[in-house]
Amino acid sequence: MWCGVKNIQTNIPLASYTTFKIGGPAKYFYCAKNIKNLIKVIKIARRKKILFFILGCGSNILVSDEGFNGLVIKNEILETKIVKTLKQNINFQQKLDARYFPAHPDKYLQFSDLDYQTEPFDTEVEVSAGMPLQSFIQWTFKNKLTGLQWFAGIPGSIGGAIICNIHGGAKLFSDYISEIVVLDKNNRIKKIKKKDVKFAYDFSGLKKEELIILKVKIFLSHGDIKRAKSVYQEWFKRKLKIQLQINCPGSIFKNFSLKITRKIGVPTSSAGWFIDQCELKGKKIGGAMVSKNHANFIINTGHGKAKDVIMLISLIKQKVRDKFNIQLQEEIQYIGF
Ligand SMILES: Cc1cc2nc3c(=O)[nH]c(=O)nc-3n(C[C@H](O)[C@H](O)[C@H](O)COP(=O)(O)OP(=O)(O)OC[C@H]3O[C@@H](n4cnc5c(N)ncnc54)[C@H](O)[C@@H]3O)c2cc1C
């Protein structure tokens, strides 16, 4: 059935491959260690009309209790290289809204005192989509490259960072992208310039077009490495204080836009603030609980099921809608529902 591709496993529980530690089994499961095998297995799945899903570090998903009735491809391709020194420096440009607005520093993440004018980009590097973001940031530091310090502590892969267009402090991951190499729906490898992709807060147009990210070129700077490392450490420390790092998929809901925040006249765009105002911290359904530290985090208390999380999400949405007449939107993605 798999035309010579070895090591396709069956009936593999997905819970341990997600940071939520929730989810039933994948019918088929494959760890791709190189691009050739990744493409081969995708081609077979497409030809045989087997539903498939690319798994990065599983840090932004909720997998159903029934699991995934298809092939899960865990991307474990780890490659990095410096491509070139730019002939002309490029100024860092932030065009999109990262939806970061400060609120009470003891309850919500405070960032503005760490932010500074980033140095112009002078280098282009290439990294494969399976690379864990935190290992990649350490690699950039070793090579005296700065820029990604704002994404401290985010436990995803490079592929997940692009698809979700992650936000770190006031920055979005797309701010650093130069070019993306993808496999399209017709199994062709394509290079796409950043300007040809629609990026927004927590959104990239790549997902809709069913593009598989293979690798990406990223702009970085030989900036103030000491400062970059200290921002990284301090930002991570603050995140650890407020956000629990285990048994959760990070924030459940997207923050609101500045426009909506102003319209309602509230002090912050943080989705957590709205949930907090509904006094839902600590609210539990089965084994799922709204974190007592950060209201936008739902924690698996041990034996949480996806169905508990779904009921809690629906309760939170209803309470926030009733109180503020606005609709929360999930940041996490549902798999196998
Ligand atoms: C403690 C904690 C803190 C977090 N903090 C932040 C934060 O500060 N900011 C933020 O934005 N997010 C944050 N997150 C969320 C999460 O880490 C990011 O969204 C992350 O980038 C997801 O990457 P992943 O590899 O885990 O993706 P996964 O969860 O594995 O997958 C997410 C989606 O990406 C797709 N995908 C992954 N790789 C590819 C690929 N190569 N090609 C095509 N599609 C692909 C998957 O199919 C899926 O649809 C946090 C999560 C946790 C647990």
Image (cartoon, rainbow, N blue to C red):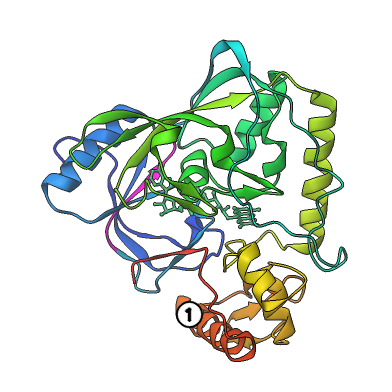
Question: Which residue shows up at 74% across the image and 31% down it?
Answer: 118
Relative placement, left or right, of 273 versus 318 is right
Which percent across, then down, holds residue 44? 16, 42
Location of the C terminus by quadrant is bottom left
Disc 1 crowd rating (10 Å Cα; few below 14, some 14-19, many 20+) is some
Identify which residue, 192 or 33, lies in the foreground: 192
Residue in the image at 39% along x and 68% along y: 24
* Residue closest to the eye, 77 or 181: 181
**Overall secondary structure of the magenta section:** strand
In the displayed structure image, the side of residue 233 where residue 195 appears, left or right: left
For mark 1, give the secondary structure: helix
Q: Is residue 182 magenta?
A: no
Task: Tell me the magenta residue range.
Answer: 69-76
Q: Amino acid at mark 1?
A: Ile
Q: Quadrant of residue 4?
A: top left
**Location of residue 211 in the rendering, given as x and y in whole percent from the top left corner:** 31, 43
Taking the spot 68% from the left edge, 67% from the top edge, the residue there is 269
Is residue 73 found inside the magenta-colored segment of the image?
yes
